[in-house]
Image (cartoon, coloured by chain):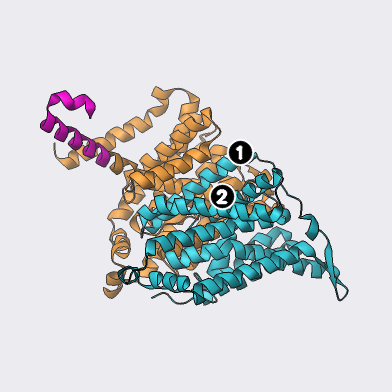
């Protein structure tokens, strides 16, 4: 079997596994965790466009995520229909991404990160302080889920399937995006901005458009989040959410399609598991960050492979040098 | 009239606190190119240290100095053993300091619980000073004076001493500075420790005004960020001017448009980014 055929078989198997998940998992709690993983995977994929392919590390995506969520939640609260609320939320999210992009793309690197962080904090400040609009810390309730084509999404299983469909569309769009000439030029601006400029590409415009695409999918994830959670509060816009999203991208390995998904699964599962036993999720998140940066800067998945290889080589070396008797010592 | 006057004094006092916070941030970011996202944590942890030292019955100023010294030591360890390994990798430094800030926030929540603490103003500064019919709250005046003294001391150190000259040499061209015998790594540890210490000192001085509570770190970090973007990275004068501007906007915004105070705070930063990306007093980095 060739590598491509193997890859295709893997994709088919993965989709089959995901599509049948509610039937072999059964428990509603785990189905909900799976929905969470998928919706955060959409967020991580969106952030990865900038972090992985554009080389632009944003710490303000929680702001875009929350803007989409708040727009939809507030419109629903004021009596608008789901379709109107969701479409408006996406338009507002893309518009906010445009504003973020115009301001943040004046620089790259650390300046970009700092400005997106500050912009994300503005969104948090609005959500928290502008009480007459957002109800401040009390948040906004989302009382119902939409029913596309008359199918109710109230049950965990049906919501899972809806999330799965959105997730599959997102990853297909992302695969197309990465392989398109535009994706290639985005990678070009990451690796050789000056050379791209000399070749006649408009580096700023490429980055700006990438920001818009990223903002759109972040908005989609924000919508999934409010429908999943039924509630949105300023906490969603906090720096911690941006940091978690970044941890998903980086822990899985940047600039890969599957990395952010693996990262989202790792972070969501750890968050659920850790929160079930201790209240110290924040500390765990911080320690994981420090450990990943110190020992596996290239991401958990490639990092584990590298460390395993190193361990295997060390084990083989000691094995050949000192004989099998030393095996237990290593 | 009197109300506006009090507001103005409070604003300038807040500006003084912001300077103590952002001077270190600006030096660390401007000189060492380390984006230190745990600077708010230094401020908060320092304030908590100060509260604990005060509780054991020590003098307020001693508590502030001890807390600053303790944080300088912690800062030196973080620079020497964690950040040093990541020299030049800005993203990794960001993530490391961000991760550490989460750990610090959680440790503070564990040790000092979630209840806000507000230490009393030192007794000898509790009153007000009357000049020309206007009352100045004495403690706020003291904060302003301290901030200005620290600003002058830092400026003298960086611009007029041998140490400052060595630091500037190390920043401009580290390899050459090393060749002529300047121990650049040690200097960088020193700057980082100094920045952390001044922030912690500011945290203690600010505690009677701001009080200490979980989330203080997350509130101070963006403020340091906008002060530095506004004033220009690495510029002490910029940090000073930026601090006072932000202090004024924060307090007057809070009084006049409480709902939007937080947004107004960011407007000067946005304006500077659009009109003068290097900041008011920043140099254009080649």
Picture disc at residue A159: none
> Based on the displayed image, in which of its 4 quarters is residue B250 positioned?
bottom right
Q: Relative to B18, is A314 above or below?
A: above
Quadrant location of the N terminus of chain A?
top left
Chain B: what color? cyan
Q: Where is residue A150 in the image (x, y as percent from the top left)?
A: 52, 36
Q: Can you give x and y, in whole percent of width and height, for residue B187 in the image? A: 43, 63
Can I make out residue A80 in this image? no
Q: Name the residue: 23% across, 27% down.
A: A329
Chain orange in the figure, letter: A
**What secondary structure predominates along the stretch shown in magenta?**
helix
Q: What element carries label 1?
A: helix
Along the line of sight, which residue is nearer the eye, A161 or A67?
A67
Mark 1, chain letter? Answer: B
**Residue B103 sits above or below residue B184 on the image:** above
How crowded pointer 1 is (Cα within 10 Å; few <14, some 14-19, many 20+) is rated as: few
Residue at the spot 44% in from the left edge and 22% down from the top edge: A26
Number of the front mark, 1 or 2: 1
Q: Residue at left 29%, top 57%?
A: A180
- Same chain, labels 1 and 2: no
* Residue B200: in magenta span: no
Count of number-bearing discs: 2
Q: Which of A280 and A89 is in front in this view?
A: A280
**Is A311 colored magenta in this rendering?**
yes
Find the distance from the CA under tag 1 to the CA under tag 2.
23 Å
Q: Can residue A201 be seen in this view?
A: yes
- Give the magenta-colored segment's residue range: A305-330
Residue A39: x, y in percent? Answer: 46, 41
In this figure, which residue is indicated by the disc labeled 2?
Answer: A238
In the rendered image, which residue does mark 1 sit on?
B111
């Amino acid at each position: 079997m060739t590598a491509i055929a193997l890859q295709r078989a893997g994709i088919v198997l993965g989709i089959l596994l995901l599509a049948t998940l509610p039937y072999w998992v059964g428990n509603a709690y785990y189905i909900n965790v799976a929905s969470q993983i998928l919706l955060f995977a959409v967020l991580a994929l969106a952030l990865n466009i900038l972090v992985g392919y554009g080389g632009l590390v944003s710490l303000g995506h929680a702001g875009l995520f929350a803007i989409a969520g708040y727009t939809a939640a507030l419109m629903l609260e004021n009596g608008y229909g789901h379709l109107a609320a969701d479409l408006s939320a996406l338009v507002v999210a893309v518009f906010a991404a445009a504003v973020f992009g115009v301001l943040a793309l004046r620089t790259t690197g650390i300046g970009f990160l700092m400005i997106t962080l500050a912009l994300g904090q503005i969104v948090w400040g609005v959500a928290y302080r502008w009480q007459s609009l957002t109800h401040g810390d009390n948040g906004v309730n989302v009382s119902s889920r939409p029913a596309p084509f008359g199918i109710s999404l109230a049950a965990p299983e049906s919501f899972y399937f809806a999330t799965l469909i959105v997730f599959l569309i997102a990853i297909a769009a992302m695969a197309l995006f990465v392989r398109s000439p535009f994706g290639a030029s985005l990678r070009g601006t990451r690796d050789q901005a000056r050379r791209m400029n000399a070749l006649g590409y408009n580096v700023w415009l490429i980055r700006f458009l990438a920001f818009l695409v990223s903002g759109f999918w972040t908005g989609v994830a924000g919508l999934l989040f409010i429908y999943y959670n039924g509630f949105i509060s300023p906490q969603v816009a906090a720096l911690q959410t941006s940091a978690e999203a970044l941890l998903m991208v980086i822990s899985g390995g940047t600039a890969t399609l599957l990395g952010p998904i693996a990262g989202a699964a790792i972070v969501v599962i750890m968050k659920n598991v850790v929160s079930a036993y201790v209240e110290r999720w924040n500390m765990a998140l911080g320690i994981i960050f420090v450990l990943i940066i110190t020992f596996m800067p290239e991401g958990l998945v490639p990092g584990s492979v590298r460390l395993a290889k190193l361990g295997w080589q060390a084990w083989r070396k000691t094995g050949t040098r000192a004989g099998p008797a030393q095996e237990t010592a290593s | 009239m009197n109300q506006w006057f009090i507001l103005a004094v409070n604003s300038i006092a807040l500006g003084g606190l912001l300077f103590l916070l952002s001077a270190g941030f600006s030096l660390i970011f401007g000189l060492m190119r380390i984006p230190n996202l745990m600077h708010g944590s230094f401020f908060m942890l320092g304030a908590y240290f100060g509260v604990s030292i005060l509780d054991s019955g020590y003098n307020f100023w001693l508590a502030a100095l001890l807390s600053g010294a303790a944080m300088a030591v912690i800062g030196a360890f973080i620079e020497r053993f964690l950040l040093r390994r990541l020299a030049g990798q800005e993203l990794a430094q960001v993530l490391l300091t961000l991760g550490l800030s989460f750990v610090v926030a959680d440790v503070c929540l564990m040790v000092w619980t979630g209840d806000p603490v507000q230490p009393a103003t030192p007794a000898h500064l509790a009153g007000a000073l009357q000049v020309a019919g206007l009352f100045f709250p004495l403690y706020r005046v003291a904060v302003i004076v301290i901030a200005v003294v620290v600003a002058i001391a830092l400026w003298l150190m960086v611009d007029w001493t041998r140490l400052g000259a060595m630091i500037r040499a190390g920043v401009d061209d580290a390899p050459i500075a090393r060749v002529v015998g300047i121990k650049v790594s040690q200097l960088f540890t020193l700057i980082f420790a100094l920045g952390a210490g001044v922030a912690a000192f500011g945290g203690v001085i600010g505690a009677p005004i701001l009080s200490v509570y979980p989330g203080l770190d997350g509130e101070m970090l963006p403020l340091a960020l906008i002060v530095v973007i506004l004033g220009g990275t690495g510029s002490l004068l910029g940090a000073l001017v930026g601090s006072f501007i932000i202090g004024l906007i924060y307090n007057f915004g809070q009084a006049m448009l409480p709902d939007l105070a937080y947004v107004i705070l960011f407007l000067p930063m946005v304006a500077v980014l659009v009109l003068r990306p290097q900041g008011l007093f920043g140099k254009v980095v080649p």
